[in-house]
Image (cartoon, rainbow, N blue to C red):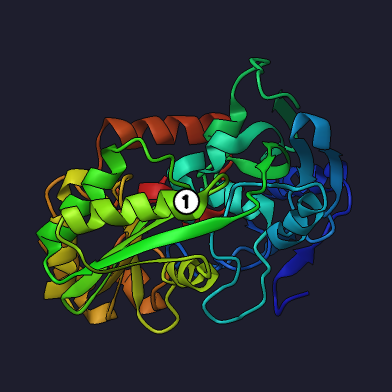
Amino acid sequence: MLGSIIAARPATFEAAASVLARASADGHTVRLRGGGTKLAWGRVGPESPIELCTARLAQVVEHNAGDLTAVLEAGVRLADAQKRFATAGQMLALDPPLASPASSDRNATIGGIVASGDSGPLRHRYGAPRDLVLGMTVALGDGTIAQSGGKVIKNVAGYDLAKLFAGSFGTLGLILSVNVRLHPEPLAHATALGAGGDPTTVAAAARALAAAPLELDALDIAWRAGRGGVLARCAGANPVERAQRVAKMMRAAGLQDVDVTEDDDALWARQRAGQRSSAGAMVKVSARPSALAEVLEAADLCGGVVVGRAALGVSYVEVDPVAVKRLLAALPAGARCILLDAPAELRAEIDPWGGEDGPALELMRQVKSRFDPTGVCNPRLFVGGI
């Protein structure tokens, strides 16, 4: 028991499915939990009486090094999986923050990362979780266990549940295991970085690098108090020479204090850490890459701090909670926002998901009703009050 909450920690897929089936039959809702690093996300509402945790579903079922694939149960910590893959010179190309703002424990699980669609700087080259998942096994709200996809990279078997469940925040069912694509781990890397005090210059430099055939592993921006810059990481063959070419382009684009470093792990750790907030509010902004300068200007108006994927239009803006509404009003037209880390009183006041009535929300409601008609899964995370 956790207070008045019943904590279920099943060790098998069947046991996990039966928890959902019983809860559905009894009219209860269930909170799905992995490593607990995102428990403060979503709406504020009544707690579910049952917490279904994947802590005991934590086996690396298969690691097919020759095929560059693996099968992981949902409760496997990403940090542990990466250590396993590294022994074969491989990696799962996901690098989101692995700890919650309140803890330094690297608890984030593969199931939670896929369910939340969380990612880090490597998304620039390798894509989001949905792009690395080849197949998936899930438990639906009525206790049905369903599978889709397979264990090979070229696969078209069944309905693509993996892409539907990736980013669904557990509203459709519980991810039990995922089949993932791996990549060779780079032996060397180097980062070029350049600074600027003008949002238009920084954004234009990032846009120029994004359009160039540089094969960058990551292309990020960072911005605070009217000054920031661009970070570009080269990995694999001849990374220093390639990073020097990137640095030359940065200078040509008007960036200052341009440098190249091979000791760049701390730089990228800071970028990942900048996607979480322990005291303020974190707003994930998705906008056109061409609107990056406007995002930076909006952050400045609110005293915000920004990190993000320069070529993808994804920015993470940390602001004081009282400035969130001002930030939302200042962002460029068409920007989509999700409130991540934030005090409960702010999440109760505004819709964390930025939901608006319309065809997209209606489609989500219909999908939800098909997969979880009794609404047993994660009621606090329902988008737009599904």
The N terminus sits in image quarter? bottom right
Foreground residue among 318 and 262: 262
Residue 254 picture quarter: bottom left
- Kindly identify which residue carries mark 1: 234
Identify which residue is drawn at 34% across, 64% down.
Answer: 193
> Where does the image place residue 381, in percent across and percent down from the top left?
48, 55
Identify which residue is drawn at 57% across, 46% down.
Answer: 236
> Where does the image place residue 105, in percent across and percent down from the top left?
67, 76
Image: 180 above or below 267: above
Residue 195 in sight here? yes
Foreground residue among 353 and 313: 313
> Where does the image place residue 271, in percent across and percent down from the top left?
43, 67
Secondary structure of residue under mark 1: strand
Foreground residue among 366 and 234: 234
- Quick one: label 1, few (<14), some, or many (20+) residues within 10 Å? many
Residue 76 in sight here? no
The C terminus sits in image quarter? top left
